[in-house]
Image (cartoon, rainbow, N blue to C red):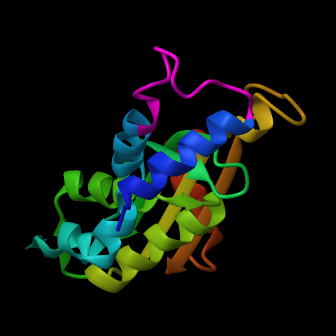
């Protein structure tokens, strides 16, 4: 759970640490604003603890066929746990149902739950795949995440436009190159 008072105290210390006057007009309310922002951008912690990942995937619909489902270009924003800077991009979710499908908006909500915490992209990609496997029980799932990391673009190596792509395959996607190639062709990556 987010502790807004501790965040406000931490922001005040950070501002003092970089040599700012925490009482000047432009910064006076900054600790409170940052605490409210953190409550939003780190909401994944509370959602996961309260079963939010499962809640999003509970409402399913029966299907006869087990055809491929691909939801592409789900925009996400997350925070790097190494530098506390944003990384953002798109997640693509492909799965082969085994008798049930989930509403497409629920896939986007699942991405949102896992994106809203400190992490590395590789872990987020795997967590989304594992949640879908656990709660939907499909024949398989493939998650591809593409993101630009501010820790690479605005500091350090300073290479704007570079993209990191991660992939997590479960079930029939684990070792089926033809199926994975089909998805990549559909995504044109």
Q: Is residue 119 left or right of residue 101?
A: right
Q: Is residue 84 left or right of residue 129?
A: right
The quadrant holding residue 29 is: top left
Q: Position of residue 34 (x, y in %)?
A: 44, 38
Q: Position of residue 92 (x, y in %)?
A: 46, 51
Q: Is residue 163 left or right of residue 128?
A: right
98 vs 6, nearest the viewer: 6
Asked whether residue 36 is drawn in magenta, I would say: no
Magenta stretch: helix, strand or loop mostly: loop
Figure quadrant of the N terminus: bottom left
Q: Position of residue 181 (x, y in %)?
A: 61, 57
Q: Residue furthest right?
A: 157
Q: Which residue corresponds to the image point at 38% horizontal and 61% vertical from the top-left?
A: 3
Q: What residue span does the magenta drawing correspond to? A: 18-31
Figure quadrant of the C terminus: top right
187 vs 145, nearest the viewer: 145
Q: Is residue 74 left or right of residue 170?
A: left
13 versus 182 height, above or below: above
* Count of number-bearing discs: 0
Q: Which residue corresponds to the image point at 52% horizontal and 17% vertical from the top-left?
A: 24
Q: Position of residue 71 (x, y in %)?
A: 35, 50
Is residue 90 at all visible to an observer of this figure? yes
Is residue 137 at all visible to an observer of this figure? no
The quadrant holding residue 153 is: top right
Q: Which residue corresponds to the image point at 65% horizontal and 60% vertical from the top-left?
A: 120
Q: Which residue corresponds to the image point at 22% horizontal and 71% vertical from the top-left?
A: 57
86 versus 109 height, above or below: above
Asked whether residue 23 is drawn in magenta, I would say: yes
172 vs 84, nearest the viewer: 84
130 versus 142 height, above or below: below
């Amino acid at each position: 759970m987010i502790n807004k008072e501790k965040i406000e105290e931490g922001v005040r210390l950070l501002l003092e640490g970089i040599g700012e006057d925490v009482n000047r007009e432009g910064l006076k309310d900054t600790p409170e604003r940052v605490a409210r922002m953190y409550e939003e951008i780190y909401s994944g912690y509370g959602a996961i603890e309260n079963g939010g990942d499962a809640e999003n995937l509970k409402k399913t619909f029966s299907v006869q066929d087990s055809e491929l489902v691909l939801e592409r270009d789900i925009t996400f924003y997350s925070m790097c746990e190494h530098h506390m800077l944003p990384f953002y991009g798109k997640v693509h979710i492909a799965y082969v149902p085994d008798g049930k499908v989930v509403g497409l908006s629920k896939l986007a909500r699942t991405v949102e739950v896992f994106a809203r915490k400190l992490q590395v992209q590789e872990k987020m990609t795997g967590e989304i795949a594992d949640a879908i496997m656990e709660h939907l029980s499909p024949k398989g799932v493939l998650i591809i995440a593409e993101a630009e990391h501010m820790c690479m673009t605005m500091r350090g190596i300073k290479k704007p436009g570079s993209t990191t792509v991660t992939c997590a395959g479960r079930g029939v996607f684990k070792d089926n190159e033809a199926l994975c190639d089909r998805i990549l062709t559909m995504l044109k990556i």
